[in-house]
Image (tube, rainbow, N blue to C red):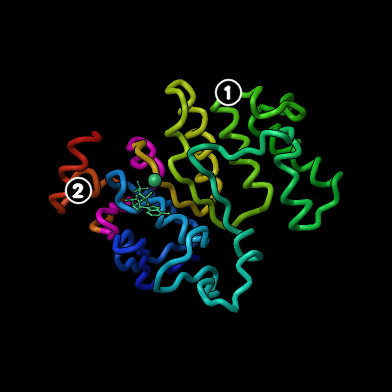
């Protein structure tokens, strides 16, 4: 579904991604971990070209999206993204947040988009919040709405950048639970997180990024039981 070829991102003389060659297959749930500043967000943002790589290629569903001739906007619609800070539009109601992109980008009729929004809200038990505004919601509610807003576009892959890091601890569980449901439903997912329990339980593969490179990756069982790279051992000793 996604392939990166010698992906590099350099800011000035700061090499943030230093040649990443990775393939993400349909249905995989890849959890990305690593120290702060190691390039995890940059990697994720290069996958849907929120950041333009300095060199190298990103392929998505058979298209080289780093090719200037590629219509990235069409393809990006197939890649849902969820951020640490929710990024809901504060001046739009919950329902308007969810229906905006399907109406504007997919040309969906308002009635159809509304119906889908209510279906998605019902799925997460927040149908009564359809006309509320983001500032009337808890952090956990905001993030779950950000997730279903992405789902309203019927993406083929979901990218999550520390989706629970800005939440009060008591709200982390409800967001991870929704992500787990998505995983169980077969969604292809790339998740940057510090939630090692989620990695153990949900990941098909855990990837350790350090200094802009994938230093080690494995099934969660092996990754946590038998880490090889000294930097990974050190990282795990701090987070587990
Ligand atoms: P992580 O998500 O692993 O914490 P990031 O990908 O956010 O790491 O950042 C990796 C490095 O790239 C950091 O040192 C950060 O300061 C730097 N960086 C990220 N974005 C920019 C930018 N727009 N301009 C300059 N440096 C950046
Ligand atoms: Mg980050």
Q: Nearer the viewer, residue 62 or 133?
A: 133
Where residue 171 appears, x then y in whole percent?
A: 49, 24
Give the magenta range.
196-214
Is 214 on the left-hand or right-hand side of 140? left
Q: Position of residue 116 (x, y in %)?
A: 76, 43
Q: Is residue 206 left or right of residue 129?
A: left
Q: Is residue 188 above or below residue 57?
A: above
Measure the alpha-carbon separation of dots 1 and 2. Answer: 35 Å
Q: Find out whether residue 66 is within the magenta segment.
A: no
Please tell me whether mark 2 sits on a helix, a strand or a loop.
helix
Nearest to viewer (mark 1 / mark 2): 1
Secondary structure of residue under mark 1: loop
Expressed as whole percent of the image width and height from the top left, the position of residue 37 reads 31, 48
Callout 1: CB less than 8 Å from ligand 2: no
- Label 2: how many Cα within 10 Å (few below 14, some 14–19, many 20+): many
The residue located at (32%, 37%) in the rendering is 196
Q: Which residue is mark 2?
A: 232
Q: Which residue is mark 1?
A: 138
Sooner in the amino-acid sequence: mark 1 or mark 2: 1
Q: Nearer the viewer, residue 18 or 20?
A: 18
198 part of magenta stretch: yes
The one nearer the camera, 214 or 227, is 214
Q: Quadrant of the C terminus?
A: top left
Mark 2 CB within 8 Å of ligand 1: no
- Write down the quadrant of residue 63 in the picture: bottom right
Residue at 75%, 58% in the rendered image: 106
Left or right relative to 120: residue 140: left
Kindly identify which numbered label has been placed on residue 89.
none
Mark 1 crowdedness (10 Å alpha carbons): few <14, some 14-19, many ≥20: few
């Amino acid at each position: 579904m996604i392939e990166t070829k010698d992906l590099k991102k350099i800011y000035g003389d700061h090499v943030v991604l230093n040649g990443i060659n990775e393939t993400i297959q349909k249905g995989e749930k890849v959890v990305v971990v690593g120290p702060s500043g190691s390039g995890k967000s940059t990697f994720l943002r290069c996958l849907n070209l929120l950041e333009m790589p300095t060199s190298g290629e990103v392929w998505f569903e058979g298209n080289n999206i780093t090719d200037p001739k590629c219509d990235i906007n069409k393809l990006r619609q197939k890649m849902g993204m969820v951020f640490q800070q929710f990024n809901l539009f504060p001046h739009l109601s919950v329902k308007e947040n969810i229906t905006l992109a399907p109406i504007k980008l997919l040309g969906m009729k308002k009635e159809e988009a509304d119906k889908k929004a209510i279906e998605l809200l019902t799925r997460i038990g927040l149908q009564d919040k359809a006309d509320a505004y983001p500032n009337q919601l808890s952090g956990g509610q905001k993030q779950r709405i950000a997730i279903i807003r992405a789902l309203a576009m019927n993406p083929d892959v979901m990218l999550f950048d520390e989706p629970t890091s800005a939440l009060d601890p008591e709200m982390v569980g409800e967001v991870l639970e929704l992500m787990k449901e998505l995983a169980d439903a077969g969604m292809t997912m790339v998740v940057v997180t510090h939630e090692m329990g989620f990695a153990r339980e949900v990941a098909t593969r855990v990837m350790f990024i350090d200094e802009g490179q994938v230093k080690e990756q494995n099934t969660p069982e092996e990754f946590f039981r038998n880490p090889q790279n000294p930097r990974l051992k050190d990282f795990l000793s701090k987070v587990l």
